[in-house]
């Protein structure tokens, strides 16, 4: 994770223990919050907050039946030729793709070489290559993307007659058997199966980081599977793998952006639209990421330790160089050697809307567009301050 990408990583990896982490764990009992080393940096969100998941975390999915396993095994052999390994490398340079800068997955959806993947798989790549099941490589062009929903449409120079997959016309249901095909863990276009365990799933640490209808699956996906297809038993595309969470307590969880044939986002992508997420340029890093969604009561508990003040709000631990936040003079949290605040702004409102935590701060910002000017109400040294700034698109930080 870097300041330039300004996005939650699509993998939640546990961080090493720190003095501050031990302090928070011993001084607070925050109702099951799991501290991790992931960074929340001005995460792209959708403008509409996902509803409560329609599945229960307490409900363990039933194992696939032998009949379902056989169906998915047969299906895999049919759909595999329509799936792709996406590599960040220049396939015109001999040997350049032997060790690509990044690896992900994708799926062909048309006879003329259009393919869907997750935007974070291709984001910022200067050169891209697609490898088909016969291990031949082809040039890739990014036609359009939707940063907020982590979708990208590619044009791949595959030969005519290369298979492609249909997109489902209806949404799936919880309990459906699903097949994923990807390149996780160094494999090459391999299957993983499971059940759909949630619709409107709360993916990501903040729970509001993905579009309405987000799918959650029991399929054991790993990094490298991102961008690959989620297929129903009819071989229809129902989602694109976007987020893979790994924790000591809960193990892996897999999430996908839902797609249907009538999806308006696909119309925009085919038209070549490149939709950036708006950002301010702030981060909540390391141990503090686990405090994304704290309520007013827990804020006060934390404040007793860190001396954050009496008014709950959003604090942050980094400001990106050249960002709207830096230009507006926003100040990140700074602690002394006793882990107590010596400086740092607390944001309490966005355009008059009250916010309590970093997650609410991010989500409210995402209801605007790049180019919009917003006004933040900030507490600095316990005194209110109005700060105006103009949002930029996330790709502008990568130039």
Image (cartoon, grey):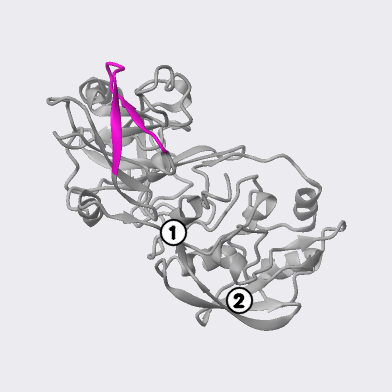
Between the C-alphas of marks 2 and 1, the distance is: 19 Å
Residue 84, image x, y percentages: 30, 28
Determine which of the numbered discs, if any, sits on residue 193 in the image: none
> Is residue 232 covered in magenta?
no
Q: Is residue 32 visible?
A: no
Q: Along the horizontal axis of the image, is 334 left or right of 183?
A: right
Depth check: give the residue in front, 33 or 230. 230
Residue 146, image x, y percentages: 34, 53
Residue for point 48% across, 51% down: 399
The picture quadrant where one finds residue 141 is top left
Residue ID for mark 1: 45
Tell me the magenta residue range.
126-142
Residue ID for mark 2: 348
Depth check: give the residue in front, 174 or 179. 179
User: Which quarter of the figure is the N terminus placed in?
Assistant: top right
The picture quadrant where one finds residue 48 is bottom left
Above or below residue 361? Residue 105 is above
Give neighbour class at mark 2: few <14, some 14-19, many 20+ (Cα, 10 Å). many
Residue for point 47% across, 68% down: 391
Q: Along the horizontal axis of the image, is 266 left or right of 204?
A: left
């Amino acid at each position: 994770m870097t300041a330039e990408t300004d996005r939650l990583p699509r993998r939640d990896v546990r961080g090493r223990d720190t003095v501050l982490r031990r302090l928070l764990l011993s001084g607070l009992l925050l109702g099951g919050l799991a501290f991790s080393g992931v960074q929340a940096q001005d995460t792209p969100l959708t403008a509409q907050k996902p509803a409560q998941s329609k599945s229960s975390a307490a409900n363990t999915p039933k194992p696939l039946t032998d009949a379902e396993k056989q169906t998915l095994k047969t299906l895999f052999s049919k759909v595999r030729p329509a799936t792709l390994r996406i590599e960040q490398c220049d396939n015109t340079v001999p040997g350049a793709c032997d060790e690509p800068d990044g690896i992900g997955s994708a799926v062909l959806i048309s006879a003329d070489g259009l393919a869907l993947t997750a935007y974070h798989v291709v984001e910022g790549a200067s050169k891209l290559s697609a490898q088909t099941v016969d291990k031949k490589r082809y040039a890739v062009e990014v036609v359009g993307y939707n940063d907020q929903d982590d979708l990208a449409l590619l044009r791949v120079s595959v030969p005519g007659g290369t298979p492609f997959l249909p997109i489902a016309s209806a949404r799936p249901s919880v309990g459906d058997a699903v097949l994923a095909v990807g390149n996780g863990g160094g494999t090459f276009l391999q299957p993983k199966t499971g059940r759909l365990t949630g619709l409107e799933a709360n993916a990501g640490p903040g729970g509001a980081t993905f579009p309405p209808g987000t799918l959650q699956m029991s399929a054991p996906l790993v990094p490298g599977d991102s961008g690959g297809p989620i297929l129903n038993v009819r071989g229809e595309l129902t989602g694109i793998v976007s987020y893979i969470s790994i924790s000591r307590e809960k193990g892996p969880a897999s999430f996908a952006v839902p797609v249907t044939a009538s999806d308006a986002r696909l119309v925009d992508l085919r038209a070549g639209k490149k939709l950036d997420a708006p950002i301010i340029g702030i981060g909540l890093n390391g141990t503090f990421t686990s405090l994304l969604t704290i309520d007013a009561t827990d804020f006060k508990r934390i404040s007793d330790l860190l001396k954050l003040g009496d008014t709950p709000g959003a604090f942050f631990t980094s400001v990106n160089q050249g960002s709207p936040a830096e230009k507006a003079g926003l100040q990140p949290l700074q602690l002394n050697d006793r882990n107590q605040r010596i400086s740092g702004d607390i944001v309490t409102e966005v355009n008059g809307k009250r916010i309590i935590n970093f997650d609410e701060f991010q989500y409210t910002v995402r209801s605007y567009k790049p180019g919009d000017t917003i006004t933040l109400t900030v507490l600095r040294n316990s005194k209110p301050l109005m700060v105006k700034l103009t949002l930029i698109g996330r790709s502008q930080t990568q130039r």
